[in-house]
Image (tube, rainbow, N blue to C red):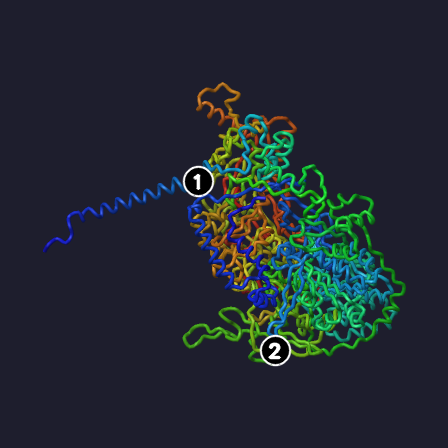
Amino acid sequence: MKNIFPRWINTVPIKLILSFGLLGGGIVAGITYYATPKYTRVGYQPTQPVPYDHSFHAGQLGLDCRYCHHGVEKSSHSNIPSANVCMSCHKNVKANSPLLEVVRQSYYGEDKDRDGQLSENEDLNGDGVITAGPSVPWVRIHKAPDYVYFNHAIHVNRGISCVECHGRIDQMEVVHHAKHLSMSFCLECHRNPEKALRPNSEVTNLAWTIASGSHSVSQSEVDLEQIHAGLEIKENWGINPPLSCTGCHR
Amino acid sequence: MIQENKDTTADSGKMYWKSLNDYSESPQFRTWVENEFPNGASLFEDTQRRSFMKLMAASFGLAGLGFSGCRRPEHEILPYGKSPEELIPGVPNYYATAMPTSAGYLPLIVESHEGRPTKIEGNPSYVPFGGSTDIYAQASVLNLYDPDRAQGSFQKEQKTLAGKTSTRWKKIQSDLILSKLVDWSGSGKVAILADSSYSLARQELVSELKSKGVIWAEFDSVDSISFESELAAKLDSKKPVRAIPKLKNASRVLSLDCDFMGNREPYSLANSRNFMSGRKVNKPKDALKMNRLYSVEADMTITGGVADHRLRLESSRMKSFLCLLGAEILKTKTKNDTALIDKFSDIGKDTSEHLNWARICAKDLLYTNGKSLILAGNHLDAETHLIVYFLNGLLGSLDKTVSYVTQPFSSNTGIQDLVSSINDGKVDTLVMLGGNPVHATSGFLDWEDISQKVENTIRIGFSIDESSQFCDYHLGCSHYLESWDLGLTWDCTSIIPIQPLIAPLFDTKSDIECLLSLLSDSRSSHDYVQSLFDKCEASIIFKDFLRLGVLKKDYTNKLKVDDLKSILHENLKPSVLEANSKSEVLLVPDFHALDGSFINNGWMQECPHPITKLTWDNALLISPKMAKELESKFPDIGLLPKPTLLNQTGEIAPDNAVFDNGYQKSPVVELSVAGGKKIAAPLYVQPGLADKTVVASLGMGRKNTGRVGCEAGFDSYPLLSNQDTRVLPVLEIKPTGSYKILANTQEHWSMEGRAIIREANAEKYSKNQDFATQMGAESHSPPIWGRDQDTDLAFKSTTTPRGNSSYEHPDHTYEKSETHGIHQWGMAIDLNQCTGCSACVVACQSENNIPIVGKDQVLRGREMHWMRLDRYYSSAERNGDEIPSDVQVSFQGVSCMHCETAPCESVCPVNATVHDEEGLNAMAYNRCVGTRYCANNCPYKVRRFNFFDWNKRDINQLYQGPLGDKNDSLPAMGKNPDVTVRMRGVMEKCTYCVQRIQEAKIRVKVKAQRTANLATGNDGADLKLNTQDLKVPDGTIRPACQQVCPSDGVAFGDLSDPNSRVSQLKSDPRDYAVLGYLNTRPRTSYLAKVRNPNPAMPDFSDSPHSYREYHDKAYPSHH
């Protein structure tokens, strides 16, 4: 009887296994690369309604982070400044810049002639006070999931700098997501806080490293010095970051 | 502040609904309106909305095709234009305000997250309540976000189409209605019918209105104060007379049908707090100093549950019993006044079978000399209260355990007088302000007729209800969290402000605003309240007053009566009492709905009634004896289950008359009283009821209410034939042949002799202080705790067990181990302090975003309460197959015990529930895959599973899953942002309010760091903090259940600190662990209950019934 199957059929199973293997491996590799926070979050740089330049304000002018994000030491949430904070300078500086129109609208609101008084025909909702305008719709960059309760106050008060999670904001013209902020990122630091702990006065100094005041040359020496200094802080301050679920999930 | 902008689909659905007004004249819309509005629900018709959603979903799906769906959703952060003072985003603010109730203003501190009030707590500055609140205050925050409240102001439009008249409510401006009202008031024939209030601002405005000729009438749905005016009339006092109990000083209390710790009486928070403080037993020696409560009652109330001696007696026989007892007191006190003694004895004849009880009780009341007190329920008549006043005077308790004062609010025109003026044509314009008079008077007033006789009618109410149906306009009334006001507490000794936490969510007005505009006063309610305050109090400025929330200012006057005895002689007529054999119906405010105002509140509907444990329904409560009589009269009624039988195939045949699919059916009967008034209601057999009393509750079964309350319970108001008689003789009870299934969360009532709740009599405890540890299987089973056998429970629950292992165990103390926390949390619940008020259940629900599930799911046992209150009965009669009549009630709050060797943890396949370093049994929702093994393995049954997206879906469409309608988003505003809102498929349970723990820990650490920094100037490694600085001081963290508890029954704190309150309670000899023999080592332990019965009483037993049950079961040979 004639062979029904041609000879090349013999290699089909091995080819199938190989190609499925490759396909599967590819999917796994793809998901591992593309579907983790390292890929999905890092580099996210949306366009903001106002082209606020952190590298200019925080870097060149040297504004402290807490000038605008003033709730960061007291609250779980580091607030985005309200329009009146911007206007405390920009009433005088670049007072007529078209780029700041959104901020001005938000600040003045019902006060159409922008004289700080409630003039005639201005009180649109009839409540007797100047109601602020619509909020500036800043686009959110860093977002912890709903079930994660990250608290800014405890971190910045206990020697963790902004730079640890947000990167060198003072060098960013437009802010982007610098670190991946996945759970492993959190846990790494919670397990070894000494790598990040620094004196309280340097928390908002994003350029600070332990090397600033020492003679260490190589990176490994700096790292070692940081660990030593960090361990000392950890010991003296009683730093004991939670490693269990209740620390962040409530 | 942070808003997602991806919800466009949901929004467009709503936009569509709003724009329907544009089409309102089209015939299709007309029909739709007619279909919809008779029920008052502003819901979309199912099919229309469904097809609309489908279409929209498709179009939005297409719009998303350009892979935009793969992108990260864009969120906006919306900061303020001008930042409000005192607000840091993420940090809650707390404001002092008050809740106006029919029992005075309830001082509150309300938590606000970025302007949204989320949680209500008591204001501790008001000493009598000590920072506690009642269950209704806790639930009232949900009313603010009730989607079924009047979302604005409306004009009624009626049209007749094809012979059918239909009604719809058209939205109009509230100011328009008010200006119309001002126009109408020009005629001078305006009458206002309002609920009673303790508002000083309103009182002031009303007197101004009255001087302008406005008729002001007051009416309360459930009358609890009219006896005060009647008593005043008898005592020749101009202002109503009020008895303010001072239970702290009382050591013997007799309560006559007075639920002074429950929802039926005012001032229950102070009463619970003061009375239960007299039952605190810190040392075994204290047990003999405990106070003693005698309760004579018809209903089974939580006050009766606390009682040491409880006598079941019909409400209509209370006066007779009081006289029986009074005669005994008189015989000791004033032997020569035989005329009075004879009169008393004569009236007391009717209850002479209880003579022995009364005699010994009287003896005990006399024994304490001025530390006794008699209280009578507010549904009893003024004559009874007069006798109580007299007897309290005889007992020497006036001004010691009770003070009789005259209160500042004079009584107003009643509803009957108002109706007669309407009939006389004296009224053109009728305003119904607050309350719900039409519903509550359905038994005796014909509103159809009344509304015909007035030209203009305006309803000012919180929701469109029965009263609105007879009005042309409905003006939405603001919630108290949206209003300004100034008022008094029930005892009239403190003034309290109401300040708004939020601007009115809708176009609504507060009552003060309405009255101001009626008076054409252009001031805002804030300015008015401020000027009023400045007028009546000059010692502090208004701003400081708002900050404090309470200011002492006595508005009462001491009652002076000259010749009480002659008044008594005049009033004591041998009353014509009903024949003994007649049964009575007692009408009480409902636990769930109160007078009807909470009927649409899901938290209240789902909170089980403390005694019956019914949810979402009320029932006609009857005594077991009456149940038997009914059974013999109507053998097919199906009230009591027959003994189960095996059918032919050998399976258990359920009693079809009683069970339906495993749910107990309750026969619906028709109850009729004089005047042809009748109601149909399901029966529920309640142990502890007086034999001939039927208890029906007022407030449920409203027809015009929202989605939550529309099918809840039955209405008993039609039985009333006037406002203040709430005890009526029953003419007939007959079965209707239909049945209703009631959702009961605890059908079994007995502990079956297990040592779940441990109790002893005071005398026994003073002699044998270890009785609690000598109970339960752990006391007489082989050693299960290995080396730890003799250590105390706090030690056991904070150390990992070593059993009898010979291996050395690592040292897990904080200093030696990195995996051990600085605190070790634990809780102690003192069962001797628990009254069963259930406030903790709702407080927990409010704090922890616990959803409601609806009656259907409660029937399946899927209620979500993290804290449940178990109620057990025990009795001397232990026949087994019969429901007992005389019972002792014991309550036990049960939530997650945070076992050190938690059985749930060992079965979780994904480590979603694990221990943390401070001993909390953590539940990581985002890790849970929903196997429910943990719930199966939990011996305390405290884990709750999200079978559905309770928070997301409409409660009637749970089974439709993602196809079902989304919930209204309004209630989401009240969610606590510090707690995850759980989704379908995850397990949840009590966390010891971990959000409060973490918040406090962070606060303490931040403060310690900053203080040390400021003090030393150091900020690097040279700054040194010691462990003590980082510890949270005892008492800082108070879980929601502890914070709300009026009787201070819950203690939470650090077990590793021997001086913390919880550690001290745990070293009490009464401390025991529930199911301790399982070696779960729970962190929550209980302090056994101590009862204080009088050995001379006829119903005395030397141990509580539950103890005897336990003893007989554990040691059967001792019989």
Q: Is residue B912 above or below residue B727?
A: above
Q: Residue at x 52, y 75 (%)?
A: B657
Binning the other alpha carbons within 10 Å of mark 1 as few (below 14), some (14 to 19) or many (20 upward) gives some
Image quadrant occupied by the N terminus of chain B: top right
- Label 1 is placed on what type of residue? Thr
Q: Nearer the viewer, residue B828 or A48?
A: A48
The image quadrant where one finds the C terminus of chain B is bottom right
In this view of the protein, which residue sits in the foreground, B600 or B914?
A: B600
**Mark identifier at residue B500:** none
Q: Is residue B332 left or right of residue B39?
A: right
- The amino acid type of the residue labelled 2 equals Leu
Query: Residue under mark 1: which chain is it in?
Result: A
Judge the density around disc 2: few (<14), some (14-19), many (≥20) Cα neighbours within 10 Å. Answer: some
Instruction: Where is residue B768? Give x, y as percent.
Output: 63, 55
Give coordinates of residue B632: x percent, y percent: 59, 80
Q: Count the labels in the image.
A: 2
Which element carries disc 2, helix, strand or loop?
helix
Q: Which of the chains bears the disc numbered 2? A: B
* Dots 2 and 1 on the same chain: no
The residue positioned farthest toward the left in the image shown = A1
Q: CA distance from mark 2 to mark 1?
A: 71 Å
Q: Which residue is mark 1?
A: A40
Secondary structure type for disc 1: helix
State whether residue B682 is above or below residue B195: below
**A9 left or right of B1096?**
left
x and y, in percent, of residue B166 in the image: 62, 69
> Is residue B282 in view?
no
Residue B630 disc label: 2
* Above-or-below relation of B1044 to A246: below
The answer to which quarter of the image holds residue B444 is bottom right
Quadrant for residue A161, please give it.
top right
Give above or below for B101 relative to B448. Answer: above
